[in-house]
Image (spheres, rainbow, N blue to C red):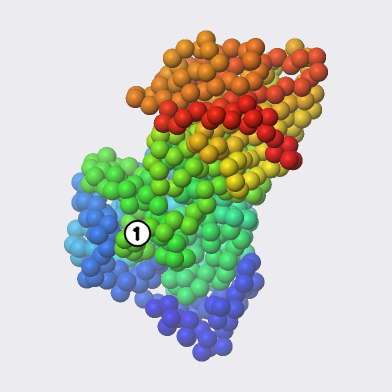
Amino acid sequence: MHLGIIAMIVAAGSLAAAEFTYPPAVDLATIQARLAQTTAEHPRLLASGAELAALRTTALPPQAAELAAGVIRDAKAMLAVAPITRKQEGRRLLGQSRRCLKRCLTLAMAYHLTGDDAYAKRGQEEMLAVAGFSDWNPSHYLDVAEMTLGMAIGYDWLYHQLDPAARAAIRDAILAKGVRVPWENPKYAGWSKAGNNWGQVCHAGMVAGALVTREDDPELAAKTVERALRDVTVSLRAFAPKGSYPEGPGYWNYGTSFNVVLVASLESVFGTSFGLDLAPGFATTAEYVPLVYGPSGQSFNYADGGAGRGPQEVLHWFAKRYDRPDWLLHEDEILAAYLPRMGSARSAESDGERLLPLALLWMQASPAQMDIRLPLNWQSEGHVPITLHRSSWTDPNASFVGIKAGSPSASHGHMDIGSFVFDADGLRWAIDLGAESYHGIESRGMNLWSSAQDSDRWKIFRLNNTSHNTLVIDGALQYVKGQAKIVGFSDQGDFPHTVVDMSDVYRNQVKTAFRGVAMLASGEVLIQDHLTGGKPGTKVRWGFLTKGKPESLAAPAVTLLSGKKSLRVTRLTPEETVWQAFESARPPQEWDTPNPNSCILGFEAVFPESGELKLAVLLTPGSRSAESLVETLVLRQPENW
């Protein structure tokens, strides 16, 4: 279908897809002309009818076949579940919108996998219920975007199975409660130029709704596509320059999944994304996922994100498009672990993994032997820089450390500047607690989304620096508008390392603050801090949050235990301090979520009269022998420190 559309366009004298560059420079008239030449057939969004039919008639790769069976199990369980209702949680209808998307996509995919009309009828029932809602909650536009995408896929993929009256009602709802809303009421269009995931999600939903109804309102469809091509470029800046994501890996999955849906939707209808896929960093952003996940199977979950990882359908899109199967590293195992959940009543009711059936459009057979081209040491660059150091890609006991710079004021940001996570022997030893419940905080009337220095946001334990693996000076918060930079990075030799200049984030507390991390050849990790200009007598707390259990706090080296595994944490300097276990399991405020089985292992050092302080800690996994050159390494400083 794609080649046919492109040929028609070229024959008509329009621009060929190859002529488009980034950012797209496409005017409304061009979009209108190209839209008029696109197919009027359904299905056409993300896949053609022939492509969907091939999923049933063509042998699928083994894991794709297992996923297809899981999708069918989920759809069968949904037959017994009542359609969603318009039930908000606080200011959000988002949970219901996501259930709508999951059900519409799953039921439509199951129909094409089996030809069983029961799935099409249940999809129609779901969509009619949603069409009957008074609105899709435009005051929180993510709700409208996800609802519109679900309805668009269901309407398009089940178009020929829908009753004529139902088809008209669903189409009218997509237009009236989705695509037309931001045009008729500009107060609901603020997301259009959003620099975070909102732009990606909302443009994807609106374009999907516009493309499946383009024959009913061609002018609306054209201007919706034109706006997306112009404005989503603001969100796409997040990927520059190397594909990292400022809001962390959890929001990478959210924003990037919908960005891929947008690109794939445009390509399925027009045969081109008009150059959106040429945005700096977009072509390599899938590399970020395996890089940022440690050998423990948990992510470096800076910002508002959890450490867990489920199957990620868009990785298959990237791996296929750019011929990089190593971006799917461990994806087979992650999907295999998830498949048994599919078909349960809980899965049918949930909104989790709602886009997973799309993987069936992109999955390829796994290579017999994975050629891993991922680097062991990596820095993201960008305005929320992180670096990652890893001892091996193939050793399950490998060591892994990630450290973050940037600013607490970044989107979904925490006071986690200088914070790190650490994996060894298959365990996450230095952890990040992730986000606090949005609804739990908002329902108290607290302002979660202000990043002002005195905002309620920084009263939350999980979000301020007291819970993160960084420094706390005299009990004070990090400076919200401060910006920490990576001033040293090496991926060479036996001392790969990172140096972060945190001085601006600790302004008015010290003159300079540098933190360095290094991956030693032994698999140990060295953490060093160098502070100057501190007020004599002021205390600096060094700490990291862990679920390991300390054996004893009396000696300079503390052994943490987790099952049969251990980590030795050695305080190298200053010698006169003592280890302490600071509270984290029961945070200080009633609104803070408990963090059971955790503690902050740390110590407090005091600034001497000189105002200069050096701290150094060595992390030695139980499976590793102690580094024999510790005394030398402590004194070893990168040149630009």
Mark 1 is on which residue type?
A: Gln
285 above or below 99?
below
Please, which residue is most extreme toward the top here? 554
Residue 348 image-quadrant placement:
top left
The furthest residue to the front? 628
In percent of the image, x 79 and y 19: which residue is there?
Answer: 611
Image quarter of the C terminus: top right
In screen coordinates, is 33 left or right of 509?
left
Residue 247, quarter of picture = top right
- The one nearer the camera, 246 or 566, is 566
Q: Position of residue 559 (x, y in %)?
A: 46, 19
Inspect this view and state whether residue 17 appears: yes
- Residue occupying the point 43% across, 81% down: 3
Quadrant for the N terminus, please: bottom left
Instruction: Using the rendered image of the protein, determine whether residue 439 is visible from the camera's viewpoint.
Output: no
> Residue 42 placed where, x, y %?
35, 72
User: Circle 1 is placed at which residue position?
Assistant: 369
